[in-house]
C-alpha cells in the first residue's frame, strides 16, 4: 500500500506535467505544423536534451539515490557532489554553446543543404543549450526530493517549463515564433530550478570530498552515463536518419513519440523511480529485492497492456483531437497516427524495462545495465538503417520497437535466469 500511495502521488504530478507537455505540443503543432521550422525547433530542443538525459534526470537518479541513501542523506556528501558534478556541467555548457554549428551538423546533417533552416537551428541551439545547467540543477533537487518521499513536487515541476514555452511567443516581441519557443525553454528550466530549490531547503555545508559515499557515487555515475549514452545514440541516429527525408519527418516522429511517452511517464517512469528508492533501501539492508521487483512488474503489465490496446484502437482519433488545428492538416494526422501506432507496440515492454533497469542499478549491477542498453541500441539503429530505404522515416519508430524488445529480453534473462 505504501508503494502504491507513493506511485499514485508521483503519477499525479506526472499527469499534470505531461498534460501541460501535451498542451505544449498542441501549441507548437498549431504554430508550426509539420514544417521545416518545426524540425529546426525540435533539433534545437533535442541537442541540449541529449546532454540533459546523459548528465541529468534518470542518470542522476540511478547514480545519486543509491549513494545518497548509503550516506544517510549526509549534507557534506551532498555538497561535495554538487560542486564536482556542476563543475563538469558548466564546462559542457560553454563548449556546447560555442560549438553549436558543429553539433547541428552532426545531429541533423540533412539540414546543411538548406542554409536557412540550418542557421535557424544553430541560433536556437545557442539559446537552448545553457538550459543544460539548470536541467542538471533540477535533476539534483528532484533526486533529493524523491529520497525524501516528496514525489509529487519533483514530478509536477516540468509543467513550469511547458507553460513557459507556451507563454513566451505571446510575451517576447520577436518575428520568428520558433525563436520565442526556444527562449521559453531556457526561461522555464530556470524557473523550474528555483521552484524545486524552494522545497529542497538544503542549506550549504562544508563539502566532504573524502566521504566514502562520494566514491560510490562516482563508481556508479560513470557506468550509468555510459548506459544512458546508448539511449541518446538511439535518439541521435533517429534524428540523423530522419533529417534526410522530407521536411516534417522529425516533427512527425516527435509528435507521435510525445503521445506514446505519456503512458510511459505516467506508469513506467513514475513506477521505476518510486521502486528505485525501495530497491536501494532494501539492498542497503543486505536483503534481496527480487520479490518486490516481481510485484511491480505484474502491476506495470496490468496497467500498461490495456492502455496500449485502447490507444492502438483509437490512434488516429487521438491524434486528430490533440493536434488537428492551425497548420496541422488531416494528412499530418494520418502520418502521425501511423508513427504513434508503431511506437505503441513497445509500450508494455518499455515500462517493464524501466523497472528492471532500476532494479539492477539499485543492486549496483552496472554491467548488466550497460549490456542491456548496448544490445537495445544495436537493435534500434540496425533496424532503422536496414528499413530506412524501404519505408522512410517510419524505420526510426520500428527501430525503437525492436531495440526495446531486445533490451527487455536481455534484462529478464540476466535477472531471473540467475534464480
Image (cartoon, rainbow, N blue to C red):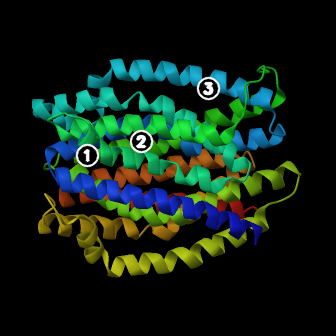
Using the numbered discs, state the Cα–Cα distance from disc 1 to disc 3 in whole angstroms. 33 Å
| Residue 335 visible, this angle | yes
Question: 120 or 20: which is nearer to us?
Answer: 20
Q: Residue at x 29, y 50 (%)?
A: 385
Q: Horizontal placement of 291 versus 143: left or right?
A: right
Question: 399 or 324: which is nearer to us?
Answer: 324
Label whose residue precedes the other's in the sequence (1 or 3): 3
Q: Which of the 4 image quarters holds residue 171?
A: top left
Q: Which residue is mark 3?
A: 85
Q: Quadrant of the N terminus?
A: bottom right
Secondary structure, mark 3, is helix
| Residue 410 visible, this angle | no
Using the numbered discs, state the Cα–Cα distance from disc 2 to disc 3 in whole angstroms. 22 Å
Q: Which residue is mark 1?
A: 241
Q: Horizontal placement of 127 versus 2: left or right?
A: left
Q: How far from the left and from the top, in percent, is residue 284?
A: 84, 48
Q: Which of the 4 image quarters holds residue 11?
A: bottom right
Amino acid at each position: 500500500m505504501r508503494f502504491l500511495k507513493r506511485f499514485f502521488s508521483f503519477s499525479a504530478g506526472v499527469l499534470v506535467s505531461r498534460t501541460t507537455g501535451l498542451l505544449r505540443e498542441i501549441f507548437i503543432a498549431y504554430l508550426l505544423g509539420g514544417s521545416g521550422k518545426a524540425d529546426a525547433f525540435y533539433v534545437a530542443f533535442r541537442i541540449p536534451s541529449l546532454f540533459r538525459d546523459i548528465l541529468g534526470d534518470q542518470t542522476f537518479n540511478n547514480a545519486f539515490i543509491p549513494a545518497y541513501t548509503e550516506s544517510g542523506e549526509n549534507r557534506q556528501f551532498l555538497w561535495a557532489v554538487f560542486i564536482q558534478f556542476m563543475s563538469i556541467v558548466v564546462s559542457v555548457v560553454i563548449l556546447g554553446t560555442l560549438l553549436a554549428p558543429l553539433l547541428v551538423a552532426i545531429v541533423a546533417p540533412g539540414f546543411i543543404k538548406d542554409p536557412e533552416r540550418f542557421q535557424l537551428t544553430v541560433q536556437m541551439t545557442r539559446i537552448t543549450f545553457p538550459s543544460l545547467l539548470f536541467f542538471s540543477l533540477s535533476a539534483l533537487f528532484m533526486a533529493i526530493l524523491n529520497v525524501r518521499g516528496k514525489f509529487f513536487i519533483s514530478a509536477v515541476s516540468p509543467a513550469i517549463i511547458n507553460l513557459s514555452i507556451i507563454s513566451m511567443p505571446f510575451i517576447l516581441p520577436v518575428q520568428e515564433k520558433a525563436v520565442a519557443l526556444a527562449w521559453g525553454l531556457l526561461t522555464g528550466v530556470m524557473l523550474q530550478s528555483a521552484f524545486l530549490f524552494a522545497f529542497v531547503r538544503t542549506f550549504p555545508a562544508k563539502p566532504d570530498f573524502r566521504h566514502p559515499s562520494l566514491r560510490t557515487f562516482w563508481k556508479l555515475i560513470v557506468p550509468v552515463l555510459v548506459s544512458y549514452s546508448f539511449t541518446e545514440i538511439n535518439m541521435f541516429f533517429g534524428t540523423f536518419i530522419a533529417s534526410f527525408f522530407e521536411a516534417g519527418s522529425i516533427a512527425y516522429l516527435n509528435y507521435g513519440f510525445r503521445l506514446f511517452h505519456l503512458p510511459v511517464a505516467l506508469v513506467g517512469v513514475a513506477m521505476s523511480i518510486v521502486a528505485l528508492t525501495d530497491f536501494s533501501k532494501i539492498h542497503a539492508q543486505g536483503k534481496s529485492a527480487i520479490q518486490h521487483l516481481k510485484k511491480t512488474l505484474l502491476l506495470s503489465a496490468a496497467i500498461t497492456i490495456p492502455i496500449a490496446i485502447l490507444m492502438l484502437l483509437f490512434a488516429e482519433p487521438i491524434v486528430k483531437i490533440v493536434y488537428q488545428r492551425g497548420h496541422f492538416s488531416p494528412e499530418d494526422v494520418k502520418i502521425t497516427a501511423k508513427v504513434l501506432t508503431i511506437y505503441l507496440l513497445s509500450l508494455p515492454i518499455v515500462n517493464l524495462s524501466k523497472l528492471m533497469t532500476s532494479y539492477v542499478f539499485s543492486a549496483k549491477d552496472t554491467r548488466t545495465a550497460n549490456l542491456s542498453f548496448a544490445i537495445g541500441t544495436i537493435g534500434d539503429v540496425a533496424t532503422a538503417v536496414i528499413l530506412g530505404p524501404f519505408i522512410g522515416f517510419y524505420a526510426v519508430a520500428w527501430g525503437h520497437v525492436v531495440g526495446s524488445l531486445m533490451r527487455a529480453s536481455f534484462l529478464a534473462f540476466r535477472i531471473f535466469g540467475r534464480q
